[in-house]
Structure formats: structure tokens, C-alpha cells
């Protein structure tokens, strides 16, 4: 029935309103969004000839690989802000589909969405990362495991903090329920945006300490430059 629906109700770009092709976001816009290139495979920071960077060699993060769809730039910022601050959960489906297309996925047993602190979850009504992950499970056929990780420390806006302060702020910020992760060896942590990677580091560190999981990837729709 999908073709009939498309014929009767052609998809429209949620941002520009113009007729779109297969998805309700203009592919002309998406093609112009900058994509990380020449970056370290482990942390996604710029590196020489896309090799593992000095920082990762000296102090390896608790996650082995970072994959992001785009840089946090252009209209993608509107989509992510629209999802989080204007309660447009439908944007999560688009973001999930766009990210799923760009990932190279093998050997991932499950996806875990980076959790929100309970007061933030209550005021927003949803966890944007979990909604994006739900959309991705459809195209990637990897299960999303809910309730295995939670945020036990409120870390309000970290935008004014540098990388070191963020790491300190995030120490033991999460709680892990190992019984929900039994039998898993390799997982992907999903967030909407990666800034310094401090959240992923803290979470990955705690997961590896408390479970049998040996391999963790950090996934996000976008990375700040
Ligand atoms: Zn690196």
C-alpha cells in the first residue's frame, strides 16, 4: 500500500514544505549537510589520514569506535532542536532513518539509548535518543534494550564546561543493570548529539566494569565540530 499512499499523498519535507522524494525530508537539504571526514575512527575528532588520533592512542576511550551521521550543522540543528524542545517526536523517525543509512554495522548485539535524568525525562515526556533508536531498529534489525542503563546524577547543561570538567561531572553519572545485558558481547550506545564524548566515555566505562560486554560503539546522529 505504500506506493499508493505516496501517490495519493506525496511526502513533503517537514522543514521546507516542498514535495520530497521518498522521505519527508528534502534530500537536497540532506546532501548539503557536512559529514565528518578525515577523522579518528575511535573518537571522530579530526586526525591525520583518518588514523587513530594521538589522544586515543595515549588514553584509549572505553568505546572502540564512534560513528556519527553528520556534523551538528545546517538544518539538522533545526530537526534535532525541533525533536527535543518543541516536542516533535515524529522527527525522531526521520533522524533514525538518516543515521541508519550512514552506519556500517556488523556484530552489534543490541542498541542502548543514552538515558536522561528522571526530572528531564518527566518534563520532556520522552527520551529523544530512545525514539531515534526505536526508528533505527526497524531498518537495522538490531534490538533496542530499554531500562538497562539510567542516569542517576543530574548533569544540567554542560555547554560551559571544558572536556576535563565534563569528564569529572559525569563520573558515576549512570547506573547499569547487568542482568538486562546478560549474554551480550557488543553494543552500540546511541545519543542524538556527541559533543566531547564525555557522556559516552562515562557510560561505556561503567558498562564494561559491570557486564561481560567487551566491545562498545558510540553512535550519534550528529557530532559538534
Ligand atoms: Zn581519537
Image (tube, rainbow, N blue to C red):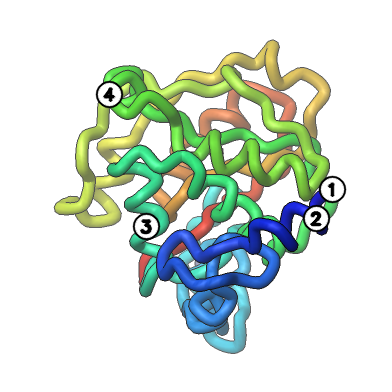
Find residue 176 and report its horizontal and vertical position in percent: 54, 20
Which residue sits furthest top?
179
Looking at the image, do the residues carrying marks 3 and 2 touch, with CB atoms under 8 Å apart? no
Q: Describe residue 177's horizontal placement relative to residue 150 as left or right.
A: right
Mark pair 1, 2: CA separation: 5 Å
Count of marks overlaid on the render = 4
- Residue linked to disc 1: 1
Q: Is residue 80 visible?
A: yes
Give the secondary structure at mark 2. helix
Q: Between residue 52 and residue 198, name the one nearer to us.
A: 198
Label ID, residue 81? none
Of 63 and 27, nearer the camera is 27
Are circles 1 and 2 on residues that touch, CB within 8 Å? yes
Tell me the mark number nearer the camera, choosing from 3 and 2. Answer: 2
Q: Position of residue 190 (x, y in %)?
A: 56, 44
Observer-side mark, 3 or 1, equals 1
Residue under numbered circle 3: 195
SS at badge 3: loop
**Which residue sits at x=57%, y=18%?**
147
For marks 4 and 3 on the same chain, the one whose residue lies earlier in the sequence? 4
Horizontal and vertical percent position of residue 4 = 80, 55
Q: Is residue 165 above or below residue 146?
A: below
Quadrant hosting residue 49: bottom right
Q: Which mark is residue 4?
A: 2
Q: What residue sits right under mark 4 in the picture?
A: 123
- In the picture, residue 214 is in which quadrant? top right
Amino acid at each position: 500500500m505504500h506506493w499508493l499512499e505516496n501517490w495519493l499523498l506525496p511526502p513533503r519535507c517537514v522543514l521546507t514544505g516542498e514535495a520530497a522524494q521518498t522521505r519527508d525530508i528534502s534530500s537536497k537539504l540532506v546532501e548539503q549537510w557536512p559529514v565528518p571526514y578525515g577523522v579518528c575512527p575511535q573518537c571522530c575528532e579530526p586526525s591525520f589520514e583518518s588514523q587513530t588520533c594521538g589522544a586515543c592512542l595515549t588514553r584509549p576511550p572505553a568505546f572502540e569506535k564512534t560513528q556519527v551521521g553528520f556534523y551538528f550543522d545546517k538544518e539538522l540543528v533545526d530537526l534535532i532542536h525541533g525533536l527535543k524542545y518543541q516536542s516533535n517526536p515524529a522527527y525522531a523517525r526521520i533522524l533514525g532513518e538518516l543515521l541508519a543509512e550512514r552506519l556500517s554495522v556488523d556484530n552489534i548485539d543490541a542498541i542502548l539509548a543514552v538515558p536522561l535524568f528522571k526530572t528531564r525525562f518527566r518534563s520532556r515526556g520522552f527520551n529523544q535518543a530512545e525514539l531515534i533508536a526505536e526508528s533505527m531498529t526497524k531498518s537495522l534489525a538490531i534490538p533496542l534494550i530499554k531500562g538497562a542503563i539510567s542516569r542517576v546524577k543530574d548533569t544540567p547543561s554542560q555547554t560551559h564546561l571544558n572536556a576535563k570538567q565534563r569528564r569529572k561531572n559525569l563520573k558515576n553519572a549512570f547506573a547499569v543493570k547487568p542482568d538486562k545485558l546478560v549474554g551480550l558481547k557488543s553494543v552500540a550506545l546511541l545519543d542524538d548529539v556527541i559533543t566531547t564524548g564525555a557522556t559516552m566515555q562515562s557510560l561505556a566505562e561503567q558498562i564494561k566494569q559491570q557486564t561481560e560486554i567487551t566491545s562498545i560503539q558510540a553512535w550519534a546522529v550528529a557530532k559538534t565540530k
